[in-house]
Amino acid sequence: MRIDRAGWPFLAVPTVAAAAFAATGRVTDRRGLQRASWPWLGLSAYMALFFRDPDRRCDSEPPAAEDVLAPADGVVMVAGPPQPGVAPEGDWQQVSIFLSVVDVHVNRSPYRGQVTSTSYRRGSFLAAYRKESAHRNERSEIWLRDGDRQVVFRQIVGVLARRIVTRVQAGEQLATGQRMGLMKFGSRMDVFVPPSCTVTVIEGQRVRGGETVIARWPGS
């Protein structure tokens, strides 16, 4: 299993601590020290789980030209009309995905196209499942354009997520499902598509980043 490079510092610290306690316990024959290594081993295992970066169908099979894919694993919170005061200016539909602390947190581009702008806004750290988090929490916003098709998506931190990693900048070309960043420890992602798109998910549905189709452009 691949581990995202942002996770190696979080994985290294508990692994080294566990090894140190285990080694000291063996040398001194103190079982208490060896047992003290177990929580560190557990933390190390969780960090490997959290920062895992599995391959998805989009990595081997190009998605259909009309498909908008889930940018992250999680549960759909909003699917359809946007929440009041959340969407960018203009007419949009909104799909919001809540990521728990056990979901894959590597983020993918929901659609293809050129990144026309990116922005980062500081804010609060409310629980990501609360609707207020969409406009009050810290977030990164990316605008994509492919011809006359435009998609906007946001990485939004939660109560535990205190760091957004965005690995794209204006002018770059992204493919649908391409890895583009990561959020650390519980968060949400919002995707905005025009009214001409058909939203294909419902609230409460579990989705997989880079695989689940959340919307389709007309003509499919």
Image (cartoon, helix red, strand yellow):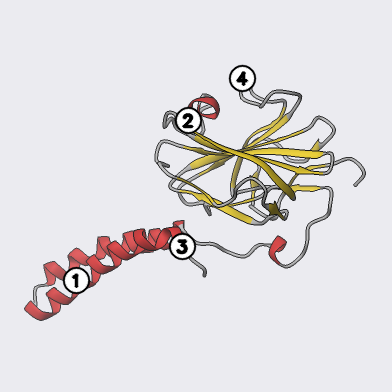
Q: Which of marks 4 and 2 is nearer the N terminus?
A: 4
Residue 27 place in picture, x, y as percent = 10, 80
Query: Dot 4 corresponds to which residue?
Result: 85
| Disc 3 + disc 2, Cβ < 8 Å | no
Distance from disc 4 to disc 3, alpha carbons, whole Å, reads 35 Å
Looking at the rendered image, the disc whose residue lies closer to the viewer, 3 or 1, is 3
- Which numbered circle lies on residue 137? 2
Query: Dot 1 corresponds to which residue?
Result: 20
| Disc 3 + disc 1, Cβ < 8 Å | no
Query: Dot 3 corresponds to which residue?
Result: 5
Q: Which residue is drawn at 39% across and 59% down?
A: 47
Q: What element carries label 1?
A: helix
Q: Which of marks 3 and 1 is nearer the N terminus?
A: 3
Q: How many marks?
A: 4
Amino acid carrying label 4: it is Gly
Amino acid carrying label 2: it is Asn
Residue that lies at the very extreme toward the left in this rendered image = 28
Looking at the rendered image, the disc whose residue lies closer to the viewer, 2 or 1, is 2
Residue 45 place in picture, x, y as percent = 38, 63
Mark 1 nearby-residue class (10 Å; few <14, some 14–19, many ≥20): some
